Image (tube, grey):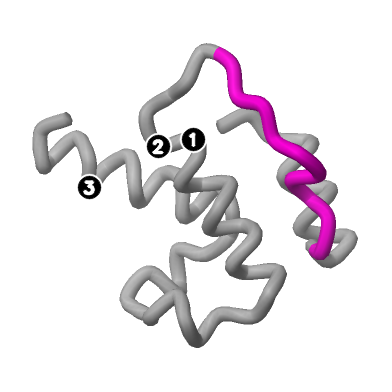
Amino acid sequence: MPQKQRRQRIDELLAYVELADRAQDLAGRFSGGMKRRLMIARAMMQRPGVLFLDGPTAGLDPQARRNIWDSHG
């Protein structure tokens, strides 16, 4: 994936999982729920046709869970 397209996709996915404001932070400083949201974004990076996740929203706060399920990445 070309760098410009990759950066655009990263920004899109960070916004999708509501982490855009933390884009410059180290993931090691994220809470457990934030790490889970980042994991979802990473899994979606290459636009897989099918993505199997085992309990992808376990550990997320109710609002983040609702946003993940209600939106389309």
Residue 7 pos. (x, y %): 22, 47
Residue appearing at x 17%, y 30% in the figure:
1
Q: Is residue 23 left or right of residue 54?
A: left
Residue 2 pos. (x, y %): 10, 33
Q: Secondary structure at mark 2?
A: loop
Residue 43 pos. (x, y %): 50, 39
Magenta-colored span: 50-59
Which numbered disc flags the more N-terminal residue, 2 or 3? 3
- Mark pair 2, 3: CA separation: 11 Å
* Type of the residue with mark 2: Met
Q: Give the quarter of the image for residue 64.
A: bottom right
**Circle 3 crowding by C-alpha within 10 Å: few under 14, some 14–19, many from 20:** few
Nearer the observer, disc 1 or disc 3?
1
* Type of the residue with mark 3: Arg
- Mark pair 2, 1: CA separation: 4 Å
Which numbered disc flags the more N-terminal residue, 1 or 3? 3
Q: Viewer-proximal residue, 5 or 50?
A: 50
* Type of the residue with mark 1: Met
- The label shown at residue 11 is none
Q: Viewer-proximal residue, 49 or 72?
A: 49
Residue appearing at x 45%, y 75% in the figure:
27
Q: Which residue is mark 1?
A: 44
Looking at the picture, does residue 3 appear above or below residue 32?
Answer: above
Question: Would you say residue 72 sits in the magenta stretch?
Answer: no
Residue contact at pointers 2 and 1, CB within 8 angstroms = yes
Looking at the picture, does residue 24 appear above or below residue 16?
Answer: below
Q: Is residue 43 left or right of residue 2?
A: right
Q: Secondary structure at mark 3?
A: helix
Residue 42 pos. (x, y %): 46, 46
- Mark pair 1, 3: CA separation: 14 Å
Q: Which residue is mark 3?
A: 7
Q: Which residue is mark 2?
A: 45
